[in-house]
Image: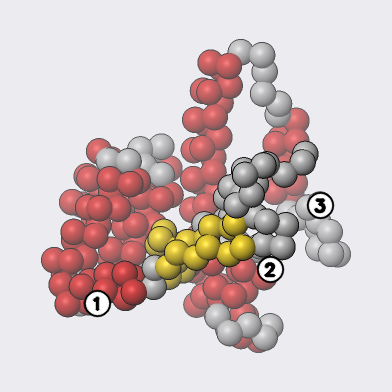
Amino acid sequence: MLGEGGVAPNQGLARLFGALSQYEPGPDLRQDLQDLQHLAQVRHRLDLLMAEMAGALASSQIWEEEGYVSPIQWLREEANLPTGVACQHVGVGLSLDLMPGGVEALERGEIGFGHLALMADAASFYKDGRFKEAPFLEKARQQNVSQFRKTCEHARHAQDPTGFAEAERQAHEDRYLKLSPQEDGALVLRWQVVRTKGERWKAIPPLPPRWYSDPDPPPD
């Protein structure tokens, strides 16, 4: 519950959580879908705010003083964020001065936080202030996040073809496919093929129980 642990939330957060607790989807699905779009915009704004805070955390020594090896670990343990999400927030937070137009575009609902995170990642491959936000922002407005990721990968390859090739080689080596027989006759399939920011690979969870080696399915 918000405020547990002896630390009360500030009044703005308390009002925000109060408003969220009062909202419920209605009987009109079309209206709910419009609300979903608005909620997504709220989430992007919250991610931006969290990124600003994460950048401040990374620039401080608080995480080290509290016994963590990195600000990423602090966010994982104290904010319950996955590694990839924590890396995104820190990366964006430390790159806000390079993306003023992107921040404004997000606040206007023209792009999402995923676009901003990819821009921040792309900016890290440019040296000596050579990163130009405008062409990236133009593409971000036109493309969804998956398409924009490819745009940023092309830009990264152009800036550092050797480093890009090495990263792809390492990524290929890290892939695996594993079949694990279980005591109850199940055959669990695990693989790692999905790259995420901040994590070399993201493990795909086991398949549903219907993937069994026995010809008869298990009892319900």
Expressed as whole percent of the image width and height from the top left, the position of residue 146 reads 33, 46
Residue at point 18%, 59% (across, down): 154
- The disc labelled 3 sits on which kind of residue? Met
Q: Nearer the viewer, residue 114 or 3?
A: 114
The label number, if any, that marks residue 166 in the structure image = 1
Identity of the residue drawn at 32% across and 41% down: 144
Q: Is residue 50 left or right of residue 184?
A: left
Residue 107 sits in quarter: top left
Q: Is residue 144 above or below residue 48?
A: above
Q: Is residue 152 visible?
A: yes
The residue wearing badge 2 is: 78
Task: Tell me the element at label 3.
Answer: loop
N-terminal of the two: label 1 or label 3?
A: 3
Q: CA distance from mark 2 to mark 1?
A: 34 Å
- 41 on left or right of 6: left
For the residues marked 1 and 3, what is the alpha-carbon distance in whole angstroms? 45 Å
Circle 1: is it few (<14), some (14-19), or many (20+) Cα within 10 Å? few
SS type, badge 1: helix
- Residue where numbered disc 3 is placed: 1
